[in-house]
Image (spheres, rainbow, N blue to C red):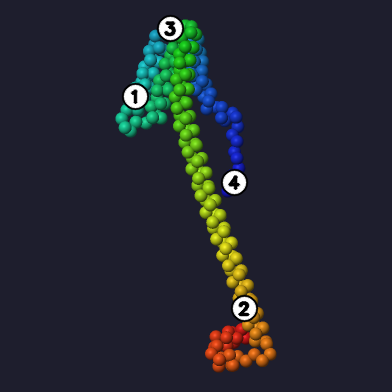
Amino acid sequence: MNEPLVHSHWLTNAVPKVAPVLATSTVLILGRIWNANGAEHSVGNAALMVALAAGAATAGAFASAGRSGDGVLAGTAFATSGSLALAGVAGYADGWSLPILLWSVATAVAYGIAARYWRTDRRDTVAYERGTTMRREEHAHVERVETIRGRTQIEVAREGTAYAAALAEAMTARAGLPGFNAQALEAAGLPELHRADKDAA
């Protein structure tokens, strides 16, 4: 019934919290590396990143449209679009001010979206733990009732066995009394005693 408490490592709890800033920082770093390798003021590279970002945003819009829209797919597509836009700006710009500004905005947006999922996950976890606790309490109550019932049945069986043993001893002692006459009892209208005496014999 008592399950062991499982404590997760602090690093396991911290990884989801730092994942958005790690993702945006990685995109910024890769964009600046691309900038240092010839992407600065490259119109062709900028056009490619704009086309890719627009394509990802369009895919996200189609994925979220309608009643059967897939929120996970749409979120992934929009995140990809934002990452491509950030990488394109970081690769095209000649300074750090605009890439850092976009990195800050992207990180804030990523944390805003992640916080929504964290709240939902926390609510689901709390609801699951409450349901598990309620089911565990119900099972514990049923087990207690069944234990009491089993003990009662055992006690009744023990008392019945003790009564049967005492009755057998009484009948044996009665049959051994001097002057006991089973025929006289039967003639007096007590045939049950006679049959019981024969059964005891």
Q: Amino acid at mark 4?
A: Asn
Give the alpha-carbon distance from disc 4 to disc 3, as whole Å: 65 Å
- In front: mark 3 or mark 1? 1
Depth check: give the residue in front, 89 or 34. Answer: 89
Residue 77 on image: x %, y %: 39, 24
Q: Amino acid at mark 2?
A: Leu
Identify the mark at residue 2; answer none if there is no mark: 4
Q: Extreme left residue here?
A: 66
Q: Amino acid at mark 3?
A: His
Q: Extreme front residue here?
A: 188
**Secondary structure under badge 4?**
loop
Give the alpha-carbon distance from disc 2 to disc 3, as whole Å: 110 Å
Label whose residue precedes the other's in the sequence (4 or 3) = 4
| Quadrant hosting residue 170 | bottom right
Give the alpha-carbon distance from disc 4 to disc 1, as whole Å: 49 Å
Q: Are marks 4 and 1 in contact (CB under 8 Å)?
A: no
Identify the mark at residue 61; answer none if there is no mark: 1
